Image: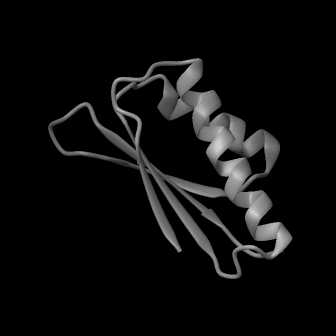
Amino acid sequence: MNEEFDFRGKIDPMLTVETIKKVKEYRAKLDSGEIKEEVVLSFTIDHQPATRSIPDTLSKTGLGDYRILRAKDKQLWKIVVTLKKT
């Protein structure tokens, strides 16, 4: 299952809070069995400090694996979070 969220125009701390809230929401659905397959969440952001704060929070909480992609010649990033069945 793939879901995309466009969070351009949002800034920290609310950007990180909203992103982690979505990740937790999908983690709960996966853990409860509501979702039965791997979940890939993609967050498009344009607030550079969040490219540190979101991964830091994901690492500290152990919510999921992530990778960060940057658009060429633009201040635009995509944080891709993968949630696997535990």
Q: Nearer the viewer, residue 63 or 28?
A: 28
In the displayed orientation, state which residue is furthest to the left: 73
For the image shown, how many numbered marks are present on the structure?
Answer: 0
Residue 53 visible in this rendered orientation of the protein: no
Q: Residue at x 83, y 68 (%)?
A: 31
As drawn, is 52 to the left or to the right of 85? left
As drawn, is 28 to the left or to the right of 55? right
Percent position (x, y) of residue 52?
55, 31
Q: Residue at x 76, y 76 (%)?
A: 85
Residue 72 in the image: above or below residue 3: above
Q: Would you identify the image quadrant in which residue 19 lies?
A: top right
Residue 59 visible in this rendered orientation of the protein: yes
In the displayed orientation, state which residue is furthest to the front: 34
Q: Quadrant of the C terminus?
A: bottom right
Q: Residue at x 71, y 72 (%)?
A: 84
Percent position (x, y) of residue 83?
67, 65
As drawn, is 27 to the left or to the right of 68? right
Percent position (x, y) of residue 7?
41, 35
Residue 51 in the image: above or below residue 13: below
Percent position (x, y) of residue 18?
59, 33
Residue 60 in the image: above or below residue 39: above
Image coloring type: one colour
